[in-house]
Amino acid sequence: MPDAAQGNILDFRVLYLTTIGRRSGLPREIETWFVACNGKLYLLAEHFHRAHWVRNIERNPRVRVRVGGRGWSATARVLDEERDRETWQRAQKLARHRYGWGDGLPVEITPDEPF
């Protein structure tokens, strides 16, 4: 497995996203596919707004992401299909190319520092 500190984060297939539970206030971590573009990470929620992690982000956009041995604090936002149409389509296209699937709700992650 590549060393995230030395290699490109795209050498890794998944990232770990930690949100804060909207009801519990406790950290909640998921493992998910991701793509990257222009210094941002994009995740796709298969169940759109029904996904608990999406609902957590809607309540509190501060998150933590981890890829390999590196981690970042970040701000997340759920894209709007109309207002963010170009970014929405780009995230889905990148995911289709990388994983063969890209039909979910895109969530944009902006790390506090470059990855």
Image (cartoon, rainbow, N blue to C red):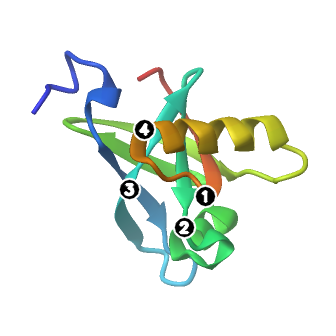
From the top left corner, tell me how far across and down residue 59 is, in percent. 67, 68
Separation of residues labelled 4 and 3 (CA atoms): 13 Å
The reply to whether callout 4 and callout 2 are in contact (CB within 8 Å) is: no
| First of labels 4, 3 by sequence position | 3
Give the amino acid at mark 4: Arg
First-in-chain label (1 vs 2):
2
Judge by depth and name the residue closer to the eye, 49 or 91.
91
Residue 24 in the image, given as x and y percentages of width and height: 48, 83
CB within 8 Å, label 1 to label 3 = no
Other-residue count near label 4 (Cα within 10 Å), few / some / many at <14 / 14–19 / ≥20: some
Locate the C terminus and report the quarter of the image it occupies. top left
Residue at image position (32%, 43%) is 66
- Secondary structure at numbered mark 4: helix
The residue beneath circle 4 is 98
- Nearer mark to the viewer, of 4 and 2: 4
Residue in view at x 40 percent, y 36 percent: 72
Q: Nearer the viewer, residue 22 or 45?
A: 45
Neighbours of disc 2 within 10 Å: few (<14), some (14-19), many (20+): some
Q: Is 15 located above or below residue 32 in the figure?
A: above
Q: Residue at x 52, y 50 (%)?
A: 43
Q: CA distance from mark 4 to mark 2?
A: 16 Å
User: Disc 2 marks which residue?
Assistant: 46
Q: What is the residue that sits farthest to the left in this orientation?
A: 1
Choose top left, top right, bottom left or bottom right for residue 8: top left
Q: Marks 1/3: CA distance?
A: 14 Å
Question: Which is nearer the N-term, disc 1 or disc 3?
Answer: 3
Q: Amino acid at mark 2?
A: Glu
Question: Which class describes the residues within 10 Å of circle 1: few (<14), some (14-19), or many (20+)?
Answer: some
Q: Secondary structure at mark 2?
A: loop
